[in-house]
Image: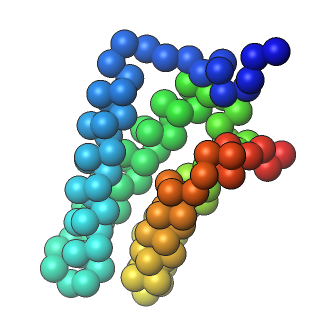
Amino acid sequence: MPRHRDQIRDFPGKRWVNLALRAIHLVGLVLLGAGLLGAGEISTGATITFASGFAMLAIDTWANPAHLREVAGFGVLVKLLLVGLMALQPAWGLTIFWIVLGLSTLLSHAPGNFRHRKLF
């Protein structure tokens, strides 16, 4: 019986697209953090972070439609909502930034059996 994770779709260049999006995402995150600390424009970093994060989520969801029901995929949705909340509540921006950064670290370095556990 094939495992669920063995059914992931792929396309030529997907790995390089993901790498490019991750690099762009990190640039956005640094710009967002700098903006929150008063050394730049918050909206530029937030837009880049949100757009690249959404693009990565879209690719991951296309590759594995069950991704959104897993801890990792649902966590990305939560992080995107939190980044969007920064735009609505700028006074909470720095606190939300650190929550998102902590959540990102936990989700990306957690064991695979936790990240890919089905929530619902």
Q: Is residue 19 left or right of residue 120?
A: left
Q: How is the image coloured?
A: rainbow
Which residue lies at the image location 29% right of the left edge and 73% below the top edge?
Answer: 33
Decide if residue 44 is in sight here: yes
- How many numbered marks, from 0 up? 0
Decide if residue 84 is in sight here: no
Q: Nearer the viewer, residue 14 or 6?
A: 6
Q: Nearer the viewer, residue 62 or 81?
A: 62
Provide residue 45's location: percent of width, then percent of height. 28, 62
Position of 120 relative to 61 (above/below): below
The quadrant where residue 7 appears: top right
Q: Is residue 5 left or right of residue 1?
A: left
Which residue lies at the image location 49% right of the left edge and 71% below the top edge?
Answer: 102
Q: Quadrant of the N terminus?
A: top right
Provide residue 53's location: percent of width, then percent of height. 43, 48
In the displayed orientation, state which residue is furthest to the left: 39
Q: Is residue 18 left or right of residue 89?
A: left
Provide residue 109's location: percent of width, then percent of height. 50, 57
Provide residue 116's location: percent of width, then percent of height. 67, 43
Which residue lies at the image location 27% right of the left edge and 37% below the top edge?
Answer: 20
Position of 41 relative to 81 (above/below): below
Which residue lies at the image location 68% right of the left edge and 46% below the top edge?
Answer: 113
Q: Is residue 114 left or right of residue 38?
A: right
Position of 54 relative to 108 (above/below): above
